[in-house]
Amino acid sequence: MHNPRVLRGMMYMASKLMPFGELDRIDTELVILRVAWNCRSRYEWGQHVDLGLRAGLTIDDIICIAEGPDTMGLGKNQVVLLQACDEFHRDRAISDAVWLKLSERFNKRLMLELLFLMGFYEGLAGVLNSTGLVLDDSLESKLNSL
């Protein structure tokens, strides 16, 4: 709220990705949670554990998201989304092999949305981590009880 001009623009972009993106809500939350985990963003993680559960993720899904794409219990589609998040985070690009797997499921429009979703939440995690924004007490309690 210290810079309303920037906040308005950021919120407009964010709304086009979540909740009004065209990607499936469960996929969106899975991606945001993996980005939050990779960036060690407690605030982003806590907010989206709650949103992810409401969107249809299970506690087991959330544990698998934290453990990564090599975890048992993930579906093929979930694995490739986590691989994409990890490569984007590590390399700032998605490999041809993972891109090919994604293209079997998503059209070009959704692939671009996926890239912007990862990039947006990576940037937001950096802002949240840098400013030290703390998770609301109610969400912190909920997160600690899982």
Image (spheres, helix red, strand yellow):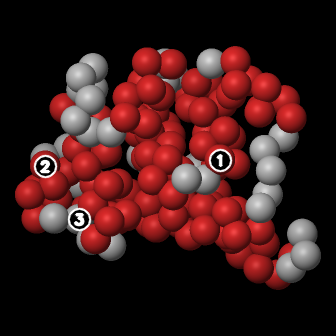
In this image, 87 relative to 15: left or right?
left
Please state which of residues 3 and 60 is positioned toward the viewer in this rendering.
Answer: 60
> In terms of secondary structure, where does tag 3 sit?
loop
Indicate whether 53 appears above or below 47.
Answer: above
Which amino acid type is shown beneath numbered disc 2?
Answer: Lys
In this image, 28 relative to 143: left or right?
left
Query: Badge 2 local density, few (<14 within 10 Å), some, or many (20+)?
Result: some
Judging by the rendered image, the residue that carries numbered circle 3 is 94
Q: Which mark is residue 101?
A: 2
Is residue 13 something that shows in the picture?
Answer: no
Which amino acid type is shown beneath numbered disc 3?
Answer: Ile
- Quarter assignment of residue 98: bottom left
The C terminus - image quarter: top right
Q: Position of residue 68 (x, y in %)?
A: 33, 39
Looking at marks 2 and 3 on the same chain, the residue that comes earlier in the sequence is marked by 3
Which amino acid type is shown beneath numbered disc 1?
Answer: Arg
Indicate whether 52 appears above or below 90.
Answer: above
Residue at image point 31% right, 45% down: 82
Judging by the rendered image, the residue that carries numbered circle 1 is 42
> In terms of secondary structure, where does tag 2 sit?
helix
Q: How many marks?
A: 3
In this image, 81 relative to 58: left or right?
left
